[in-house]
Amino acid sequence: MIRLNRSDWIFIAICVAIAALSVFVVLHWFTRVFPEASIDFRYDRDSSRSIAEPLVAAQVGGMKHTAVFDGDDQAKIFLERTLGLARATPVMRSEVRLWWWHHRWFRPLQEEELAVDVAPTGEIVGYDDTIPEARALPSPDVAGARRVAEAFLGRARVNLADLQLVSQSERRLPQRMQRIFTWESQSVHPAGTAYRHVVTVDGDRVGSYRQKLRVPDQWSRSYEELRSKNGLAGLIDSVLLLVTGICIIVVFVVRLLRGDVRLRFAIGIFLATFVLAAGVALNSFPSALASYSTTSSYSAFLAQFVFFRVLLWGIGVGIFLVVVAGVGEVMYRERLPQHLAIPRLWTPRALASRRVFRSLILGYTLVALFLGYQVAFYLIADKFGAWSPAEVPYDSLLNTAFPWVVVLFAGFFPAMSEEFMSRAFSIPFFEKIFRSRVAAVAIAAFIWGFGHSTYPNQPFFIRGLEVGIAGCILGAIFYRFGLLPLLIWHYTVDALYTALLLLRSGNHCYVVSGALSPPPAGGLRTTPARPPRPDYPERGRHS
């Protein structure tokens, strides 16, 4: 049992005070600075299927089914930047449908398939009936095709009285005619643009339907130009990260040949990473199935999924972390021998030590401090015109079988890879090169920071500056307290941000799933850097 002395109590008191102040800032201003797009999850993946199936029940017998969550990010950002968040939020929540559950029915090696999109609030917002182009179908005249389209809109519970037909066109296929009808809502004109319902009648039946916001072309072009600066900053930083990665590989090989790399530690890292990475890949099967191409056999699809997306990906991520953590541990142990080496953390004596106890307290204090720092940073940046979109962070985890598995991996991989690369390796390495601790901390921090510059935040450098400044603070903590508190902090922050969508969804299943993702036990469940995650786009604001 740890006996606390006076300095321990002073340390705890300081941490509690910092955490309390940070929590106060977060509770008062977090949603203002980091608004989360409002999604009313009245229907989840399973319950939305009961709305989709009546449209296709007569055709889907014997077909395979899959469902994923999707949305229109461009329309969301257009509304936010044009209307401002305060006015855009009620529009996105009640007037337009920007998110949906995409239900798909198919048979392997058959071209024909069906799909229905259902909004989380229960409305049908999309439909597809894929018909081979060579198939012959009766083709009614324009008036008859329009009646087919209007009958479908009625089945989809669209208010026809609110719609005005604005255009119609046709396309001749070898054995039938396609007619496209476009209606616009008379009551919904968000940001002065049209909200459209487009129905394609393929022969004598509906081939597709979409309701969507018409984003002006000029706005799209100007936004792409704006985003290109983010892409350029990210590209430059990628070159610097590539150089760092090459240095890591070279140093790893040299140190491995010298016998400096602890093999038991490396093997443990590989096994833990492989299990988590392979598990999260298996967990992504629903998403992979949603993109399955019916031109290949189902058995070939399964074999490729298991071999490439589970085994090879798990092995690749495991080897990557072995190299990064292996060489980072060597550099850390040599440069800061006064701190407890990471491989020794798992001994009973280490787990019961004062240093591990302090690391646990400091790690969780850093979680609150980092959240408070981000809120304060963007409160100030907002005064100078900075902009952060209302996000739906990590919505791809809704496409997995067990979302809490994604949360665990999203905590584990970023903490391990980023902390061992950007702190344990980069700071000692740059200090040797530049003969300056300050330069080493700053260079490592801003290379790490601008790795986040491809986020949609504007101006393009704002995320790099925010994360880079945080990296400088973390570098100072690294020298004073070692690597363990940073691993605890990084795991907890990334897991928390990833789980926010589940915890704030209002859907009982998602809330429970998010709550099932535990914090690092004893502060020692470490976590690697941002992973090469399959099907998990980089959305969100974690480090």
Image (cartoon, grey):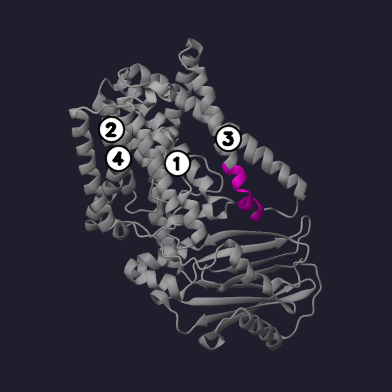
Place of residue 316 in the rendered image (x, y in percent of width and height, measured from the top left): 58, 32
Q: Which residue position holds label 3? A: 275
Q: Which mark is residue 366?
A: 4
Q: Residue at x 51, y 71 (%)?
A: 121
For the residues labelled 1 and 3, the Cα–Cα distance comes to 14 Å
Nearer the camera: disc 2 or disc 1:
1
Amino acid type at mark 2: Ala
Mark 2 touches mark 3? (CB < 8 Å):
no
Place of residue 126 in the rendered image (x, y in percent of width and height, measured from the top left): 60, 70
Amino acid type at mark 4: Leu
Place of residue 347 in the rendered image (x, y in percent of width and height, measured from the top left): 43, 22
Q: Which residues are magenta?
A: 280-290
Q: Number of labelled discs?
A: 4
Amino acid type at mark 3: Val
Task: Kindly state the secondary structure of the residue where label 3 is placed.
Answer: helix
Taking the image as drawn, is residue 386 in sight? no
Give the residue furthest to the top.
258
Q: Which mark is residue 411?
A: 1
Q: Residue at x 26, y 31 (%)?
A: 476
Q: Earlier in the sequence, mark 1 or mark 3?
A: 3
Q: Which mark is residue 170?
A: none
Amino acid type at mark 1: Gly
Crowding at dot 1, Cα within 10 Å, few <14 / some 14-19 / many 20+, comes out as many
Reply above or below: 109 against 415: below
Q: Earlier in the sequence, mark 4 or mark 2?
A: 4
Q: Which residue position holds label 2? A: 442
Task: Kindly state the secondary structure of the residue where label 2 is placed.
Answer: helix
Q: Earlier in the sequence, mark 1 or mark 4?
A: 4
